[in-house]
């Protein structure tokens, strides 16, 4: 079988795209990471607020604030907060583990974003239930692109 | 082989019992993601801080698992309730034997 010009060009185009596709996590990988955290349990929407600037100029240092509505008492508190990015090479960004001694479930940190994407925050309560919130952001200069 | 670096902890020195303290911690670290390449095309190996923990009078009150998506010089602002006068210990550990720790004293009235 001979390869005609059209097939060759198409093949080359696909081949050139492959490394780019491999470098970044897909939405499916992000979902997989979320599934691993949830371990088969459902995540209800609400209670979790994730604040990321809607437009990010430099993805290398993005200020992110996550807070969960919770009284933070021994009977009702947040056990963990996981941050997952769907468009980063690795979907897991950071995990915080809290106790009632935190007083308030609000954490600020600085993260890297590889692409314009939806970032998700999943909070695990002490009763084992999960709540989630998300924030969409547009990244002008992505992290991991520099030489 | 053990590496360490500069750390800064910002928190009040005194507090009322039951007050919620805001603690800002920052540690000097490149957080090399492992996705960057040198000019010759060689991959720069991953070198990040993996773990942070804050203990209050020996009891762990806050812990963080860090991944390569944390920005360089990781800054984390978190809270804790002032319970007793004592020391808060902050510990970081990471790749290639990285370890840093610092303590702060808190007077609770």
Image (cartoon, coloured by chain):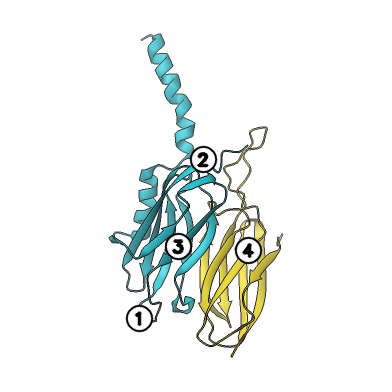
- Report the Cα–Cα distance between label 2 and label 1: 43 Å
Per the image, the residue denoted by label 1 is A75
Name the residue at 45% across, 28% down: A17
Per the image, the residue denoted by label 3 is A66
Q: Where residue A23 sits: x, y (%)?
A: 49, 38
Name the residue at 50% across, 57% down: A64
Per the image, the residue denoted by label 4 is B26
Label located before the other in sequence (2 or 1):
1
Tag 4–tag 3 contact (CB < 8 Å): no
- Report the Cα–Cα distance between label 2 and label 3: 22 Å
Name the residue at 40% across, 53% down: A135
- Report the Cα–Cα distance between label 4 and label 2: 26 Å
Tag 2–tag 3 contact (CB < 8 Å): no
Mark 2 on the same chain as mark 1 = yes
Name the mark nearer the viewer: 4 or 2.
Answer: 2
Q: Where residue B108 sits: x, y (%)?
A: 59, 88
Write down which chain is painted cyan. A
Per the image, the residue denoted by label 2 is A140
- Report the Cα–Cα distance between label 3 and label 1: 22 Å
> What numbered label is drawn on residue B19?
none
Name the mark nearer the viewer: 2 or 1.
Answer: 2
Instruction: Please give left or right for residue B6 compared with residue A98 in the image.
Output: right
A73 vs A95: above or below: below
């Amino acid at each position: 079988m001979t390869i005609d010009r059209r097939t060759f060009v198409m093949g080359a185009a696909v081949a050139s795209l492959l490394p780019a596709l491999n470098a970044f996590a897909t939405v499916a990988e992000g979902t997989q990471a979320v599934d691993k955290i949830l371990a088969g349990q459902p995540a209800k929407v609400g209670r979790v607020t994730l604040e990321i600037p809607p437009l990010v100029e430099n993805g290398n240092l993005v200020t992110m604030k996550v807070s969960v509505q919770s009284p933070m008492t021994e009977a009702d508190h947040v056990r963990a907060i996981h941050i997952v990015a769907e468009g980063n090479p690795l979907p897991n960004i950071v995990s915080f583990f809290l106790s009632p001694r935190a007083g308030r479930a609000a954490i600020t940190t600085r993260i890297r974003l590889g692409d314009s994407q939806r970032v998700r925050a999943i909070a695990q309560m002490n009763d084992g239930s999960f709540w989630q919130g998300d924030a969409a952001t547009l990244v002008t200069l992505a992290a991991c692109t520099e030489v | 082989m053990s590496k360490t670096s500069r750390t800064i902890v910002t928190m009040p020195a005194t507090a009322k019992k039951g007050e919620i303290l805001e603690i800002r911690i920052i540690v000097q670290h490149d957080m090399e993601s492992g996705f960057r390449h040198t000019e010759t095309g060689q991959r720069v190996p991953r070198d990040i801080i993996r773990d942070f923990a804050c203990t209050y009078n020996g009891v762990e009150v806050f812990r963080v698992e860090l991944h390569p998506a944390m920005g360089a010089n990781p800054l984390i602002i978190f809270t804790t309730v002032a319970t007793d006068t004592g020391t808060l210990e902050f510990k970081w550990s990471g790749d290639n034997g990285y370890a840093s720790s610092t303590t702060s004293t808190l007077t609770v009235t």
